[in-house]
Image (spheres, helix red, strand yellow):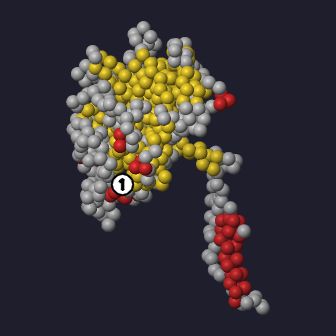
């Protein structure tokens, strides 16, 4: 039997000639009411929408539809190779999305609001291997001058219909396999921004890695969303240290930024560090020695955007001893865990800071084979209000107990002050050293990924903080081929496990690692990439953090009566 079709009646204003005694205004109001009645009558004839998981009036979990990340400027004052690697894990729902990376310029930022893509070309094609082309050419000390200025013409190609064309550097074609390519190779190269939509948005991640020549070192950083507050612990302006902050405005609105530096004597007051203006689509770098008012051995840096949003990076170089990007710390908290201490570390330098009006007294613990333990002679650290404090560790073959993590907890839970923490770790080989800067981390949550892992050169460290945990580790195919591999790993509470056999079979090009929490935890994870150069144990370490692939939204139901209230 054929179902009857409900046809909407034609909307016709009713005749009002039969309404006696009514004024023209009153007749108009009656006509409007009649039309509304017809409209809502039609609404009632339509079938109701299918109920969702949040139809009980609470919240609905849905996947993100767009992810935006910002990468810092390629290294200043160094000659080397900088590569950017994009990745989205499989499992995203919805239609085929778009994944791309472009240089931060005024035209590109404007075009990203309503992208007009140029024809496919070499600049937008992913490559399987790092290109080896030089990037981040020497430009002396960071100048504080904007980079990525508009040239007066839309980037890469002519405007279309008066709108700038988005000049794409790397394109990600599909989930489950990375795409990689070189960063800008001019001396005043700005930062980059990456956008993923549709099924590429959930879990989208980008990694930037630089191999420098001359003084061998490896510097890596996870590209992160623009924000208004970033903490770094472990910067310095003494001796051979050359540390600088990069600011990238990948938004279409201007930003105003303050740099707040904390040392062992408190907040360093400097008017030059406040009210830094950053125009849309521009990048700037600032050497910290211009703001610390003399040499300060151990600094915590808080970057605050008073208006707008920015992407932030902090790079450190200690002469020939090592260089890397500082890992950003999680927001201040009473308890902080720093994962990713290598198994062959020789020394470690802990910097803890608080901007609280109260002092912080903290217990210090290391993860060991049998759980958390207190290192002899390093049982605690006292941090004065608004200042930094330090603690040094020495490791030998007899005292090393494999990969590890540091946990700081309040000595008295009733008097807990929020802190941030960073840890410099050094590896040594034949008298040559290399350094990396770790930071207080956050759990991987349901899932986290990291791109740019390389065959035979990658180590993964997992730390379970409170209870035993089980995770699933997936290695993707390489950018130019390979077979994904998956394994489940158990991590006992208070221990750090190094995961072996990560490389996928037949891997060609950089691959990605995804960690999913199956039970227990929380679990913190860090990836170490090691590429030895002329006996120098060059390495860099980045954390894996919750990819926030889903968000919770309130359930909204239509209420036609709202227009009558």
Q: Position of residue 452 (x, y in %)?
A: 35, 33
Q: Is residue 459 left or right of residue 490?
A: left
Q: Nearer the viewer, residue 419 or 116?
A: 419
Q: Which residue is mark 1?
A: 281
Q: Residue sitting at 37 percent across and 38 percent down?
A: 294
Residue 110 higher or lower than 549, as above or below: below
In this view, 398 is above or below 463: above
Question: Of helix, strand and loop, which one carries label 1?
Answer: loop
Q: Is residue 360 left or right of residue 188?
A: right
Q: Foreground residue, 16 or 1?
A: 16
**Which of the 4 image quarters holds residue 347?**
top left
Q: Nearer the viewer, residue 382 or 394?
A: 382
Q: Residues within 10 Å of mark 1 (few under 14, many from 20)?
A: many
The residue at the point 23 percent across, 46 percent down is 186
Q: Percent position (x, y) of residue 393? A: 44, 18
Position of residue 237 relative to residue 273, above or below, is above
Residue drawn at x 59%, y 38% as measured from the top left: 357
Residue sitting at x 28%, y 17%: 431
């Amino acid at each position: 039997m054929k179902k009857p079709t409900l046809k909407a009646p034609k909307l016709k204003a009713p005749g009002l000639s039969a309404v006696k005694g009514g004024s023209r205004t009153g007749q108009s109001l009656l006509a409007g009411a009649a039309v509304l009645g017809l409209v809502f009558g039609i609404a009632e004839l339509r079938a109701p929408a299918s109920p969702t998981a949040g139809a009980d009036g609470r919240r609905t979990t849905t996947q993100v539809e767009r992810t935006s990340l910002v990468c810092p400027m390629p290294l200043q004052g160094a000659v080397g190779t900088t590569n950017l690697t994009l990745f989205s894990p499989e499992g995203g729902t919805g239609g085929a999305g778009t994944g791309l990376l472009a240089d931060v310029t005024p035209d590109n930022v404007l075009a990203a609001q309503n992208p007009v893509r140029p024809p496919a070309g070499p600049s937008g094609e992913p490559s399987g291997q790092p290109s080896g082309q030089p990037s981040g050419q020497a430009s002396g000390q960071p100048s504080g001058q904007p980079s990525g200025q508009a040239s007066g013409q839309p980037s890469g190609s002519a405007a279309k219909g008066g709108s700038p064309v988005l000049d794409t550097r790397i394109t990600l074609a599909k989930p489950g396999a990375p795409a990689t390519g070189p960063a800008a190779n001019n001396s005043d190269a700005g930062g980059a921004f990456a956008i993923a939509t549709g099924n590429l948005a959930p879990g989208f991640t980008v990694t930037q890695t630089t191999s420098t020549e001359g003084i061998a070192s490896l510097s890596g950083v996870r590209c992160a969303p623009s924000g208004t507050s970033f903490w770094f612990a472990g910067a310095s302006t003494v001796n051979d240290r050359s540390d600088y902050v990069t600011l990238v405005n990948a938004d279409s609105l201007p930003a105003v930024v303050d740099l707040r530096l904390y040392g062992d004597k408190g907040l360093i007051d400097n008017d030059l560090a406040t009210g830094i203006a950053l125009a849309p689509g521009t990048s700037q770098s600032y050497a910290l020695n211009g703001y610390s008012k003399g040499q300060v051995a151990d600094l915590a840096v808080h970057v605050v955007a008073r208006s707008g949003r920015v992407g932030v990076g902090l790079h450190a170089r200690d002469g020939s001893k090592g260089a890397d990007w500082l890992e950003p710390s999680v927001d201040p908290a009473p308890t902080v865990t720093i994962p990713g201490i290598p198994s062959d570390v020789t020394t470690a330098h802990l910097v803890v800071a608080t901007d609280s009006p109260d002092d912080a007294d903290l217990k210090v613990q290391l993860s060991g084979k049998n759980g958390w333990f207190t290192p002899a002679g390093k049982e605690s650290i006292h941090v004065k209000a608004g200042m930094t404090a330090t603690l040094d560790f020495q490791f030998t073959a007899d005292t090393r107990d494999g990969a590890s993590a540091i946990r700081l907890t309040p000595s008295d839970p009733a008097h807990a002050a929020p802190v941030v923490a960073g840890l410099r770790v050094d590896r040594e080989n034949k008298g040559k050293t290399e350094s990396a800067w770790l930071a207080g981390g956050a759990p991987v949550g349901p899932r986290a990924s990291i791109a740019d892992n390389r065959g035979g050169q990658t180590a993964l460290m997992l730390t379970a903080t409170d209870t035993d945990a089980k995770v699933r580790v997936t290695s993707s195919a390489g950018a130019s081929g390979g077979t994904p591999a998956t394994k489940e790993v158990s991590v006992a509470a208070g221990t750090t496990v190094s995961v072996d056999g990560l490389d996928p079979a037949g891997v060609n090009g950089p691959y990605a690692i995804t960690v999913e929490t199956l039970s227990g935890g929380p679990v913190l994870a860090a990836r170490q990439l090691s590429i030895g150069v002329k006996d120098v144990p060059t390495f860099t370490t980045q954390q894996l953090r919750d990819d926030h692939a889903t968000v919770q939204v309130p359930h909204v139901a239509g209420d036609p009566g709202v227009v009558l209230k």
